[in-house]
Image (spheres, rainbow, N blue to C red):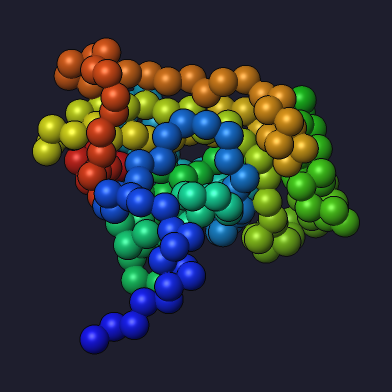
Amino acid sequence: MPRIDEEAYKAAEETQGGFSQMEPGAYMLRIKKVLAEWEERDFKTQMPAYRSAANGDGVMFVFDVDEGEHAGEFSRDFYMDGDDFAENKLWMHQVKYTWGNLGRLKLMNRVLAACNPGFDPMAALNADQWSMFIGRRFGAVLDGTVKTNQNGYDSWTFKVGQWITEDELRAGDYNPPKITDKRESAGAAEPSARPDSNDDIPF
């Protein structure tokens, strides 16, 4: 017979249980992995294209949600391959850190420095010390695309839209997330979801 902590029981809020769907919005994220080379689809040729820091394409930050109700969202089994992130699902929780656009680089570096006191992202970049970015936090507005999956439920995918500092996140000083509705019956009242509802989206 289990023994329930009575104080914890009294303090608990009633819930239906089950899966809580993450939705577009502002989140504090943490860099979990940095890729200095990777392949992605070339949208002109629809063929794999090789990208690398050495070629000036930047690096890829693989992130997870760092706090709140959805902390650890992208470390769920669905996104993992053993003890590492599944390569074919990295696109669901990654952002490019590039220096092709110096204005954007300056913005990303300001956010990284503000969210990680004592960290100098420009010095780490210039030294090619990509491991120094692992564990660093940044705020972001995650835009979302919702569509109907093969089971008939709504399925969200996310993309970093706006980089923001932690102070900007707390103050609500950011643009609302952009939402793209690709559901079969667009305009349904409320999106619904089930665990691992992204399983019908190809890499």
- Left or right, residue 1 beside residue 109: left
Residue 127, by quadrant, is bottom right
Residue furthest top as drawn? 187
Question: What residue is shown at x 71% (from left), y 25% (from top)?
Answer: 173
Residue 47: x and y, percent? 32, 35
| Residue 38 in the image, given as x and y percentages of width and height | 47, 50
**Residue 165 image-quadrant placement:** top right
Q: Position of residue 134 (x, y in %)?
A: 65, 60
- Extreme residue in the left direction: 151
Horizontal relation, residue 109 to residue 94: left or right: right
Q: Quadrant of residue 158?
A: top left
159, 53: nearer the viewer = 159
* Residue 157 makes an appearance in the image: yes
Q: Would you place residue 192 above or below residue 60 in this image?
A: above
Q: How many marks?
A: 0
Q: Is the N terminus in the top left, top right, bottom left or bottom right quadrant?
A: bottom left
- Report the residue at 25% width, 39% height from top: 193
Q: Does residue 108 appear left or right of residue 16 in this picture?
A: right
Up/down of 174 relative to 69, above or below: above
* One can see residue 165 in this view: no
Residue displayed at 39% across by 31% down: 42
Query: Quarter holding the C terminus?
Result: top left
Q: Classify 176 as above or below 149.
A: above
Of all residues, the one furthest to the right in this rendering is 118
Q: Residue at x 74, y 56 (%)?
A: 128
Q: Nearer the viewer, residue 186 or 159?
A: 186
Return the x and y of residue 14 as percentages of the image width and height. Answer: 35, 51
Q: Viewer-proximal residue, 161 or 42?
A: 161
